[in-house]
Image: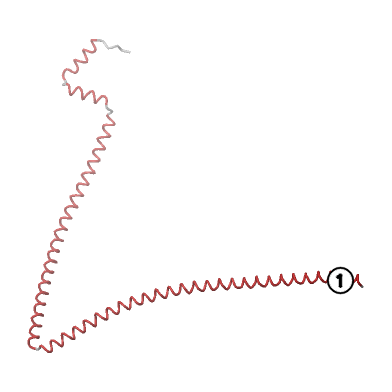
């Protein structure tokens, strides 16, 4: 182990006399930090910078395309709005002319106009009534379908109940038959025992 002497310390201090304090500090840090890690960080920063540049270019292209599309869409929208306004003006003019014609016809031919208006009113009422009938019929059909479905369900439930009742009746008949058989067998056994009891008595008396 080489011991530090005052002469060596003086020599090292003389080496750093030509540098400023910040430069000496930076050189000391550079000696501490690993250069490979620094190079890896620089490479990663360069790659990220390239990616950011590509994304910026893509965003610029997207903005340019959106601006062009918006211009074309704005022109078409203006054309459509102008067309709709013209159509509205034309329709207003048509309705005004129809009203003027109605007033003229009413003034010139009041009876025919009244008859035509009544006929048109009847036709409108008939169309409204037909539409309401169709609606009612559709509602009635739905109600009938629902009632039919409910009736089918009730019929199926009743059929199931009848089948169950029939099964219960058959079981009851079977039970009654078994009881009758048991009663008949018990009576027969009772009669047999009585006959056997009487037979020895008769033999004794004889």
Mark count: 1
- Quarter of the figure with residue 198: bottom right
| Label 1 element class | helix
- Quarter of the figure with residue 126: bottom left
Q: Residue at x 69, y 72 (%)?
A: 180
Residue ranking furthest to the front: 205
Query: Which of the two residues, 13 or 172, is positioned nearer the viewer here?
Result: 172
> Which quadrant holds the N terminus?
top left
Residue 199 sits above or below residue 74 on the image: below
Residue 133: % across, % down: 29, 80
Few, some or many C-alpha atoms within 10 Å of disc 1 (few <14, some 14-19, many ≥20)?
A: few
Q: Residue at x 21, y 84 (%)?
A: 123
Query: Which of the two residues, 80 or 90, is positioned nearer the viewer here?
Result: 90
Quickly name the residue at label 1.
199
Residue 111 sits above or below residue 19 on the image: below
Residue 114: % across, % down: 13, 87
Residue 53 sits above or below residue 132 on the image: above
> Which quadrant holds the C terminus?
bottom right
In the displayed structure image, the side of residue 147 where residue 53 appears, left or right: left
């Amino acid at each position: 182990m080489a011991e530090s002497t005052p002469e060596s310390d003086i020599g090292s201090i003389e080496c750093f006399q030509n540098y400023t304090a910040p430069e000496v500090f930076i050189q000391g840090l550079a000696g501490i930090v690993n250069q490979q890690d620094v190079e890896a960080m620089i490479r990663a920063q360069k790659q990220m910078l390239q990616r950011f540049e590509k994304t910026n270019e893509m965003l610029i292209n997207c903005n340019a395309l959106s601006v062009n599309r918006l211009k074309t869409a704005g022109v078409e929208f203006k054309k459509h709005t102008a067309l709709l306004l013209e159509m509205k003006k034309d329709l207003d003019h048509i309705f005004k002319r129809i009203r003027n014609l109605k007033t003229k016809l009413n003034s010139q031919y009041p009876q025919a106009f009244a008859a035509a208006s009544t006929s048109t009113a009847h036709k409108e009422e008939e169309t409204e009534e037909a539409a309401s009938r169709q609606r009612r019929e559709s509602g009635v059909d739905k109600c009938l379908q629902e009632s039919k479905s409910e009736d089918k369900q009730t019929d199926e439930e009743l059929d199931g109940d009848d089948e169950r009742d029939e099964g219960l009746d058959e079981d009851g008949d079977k039970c009654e038959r078994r009881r009758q058989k048991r009663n008949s067998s018990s009576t027969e056994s009772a009669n047999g025992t009585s006959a056997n009891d009487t037979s020895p008595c008769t033999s004794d008396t004889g």
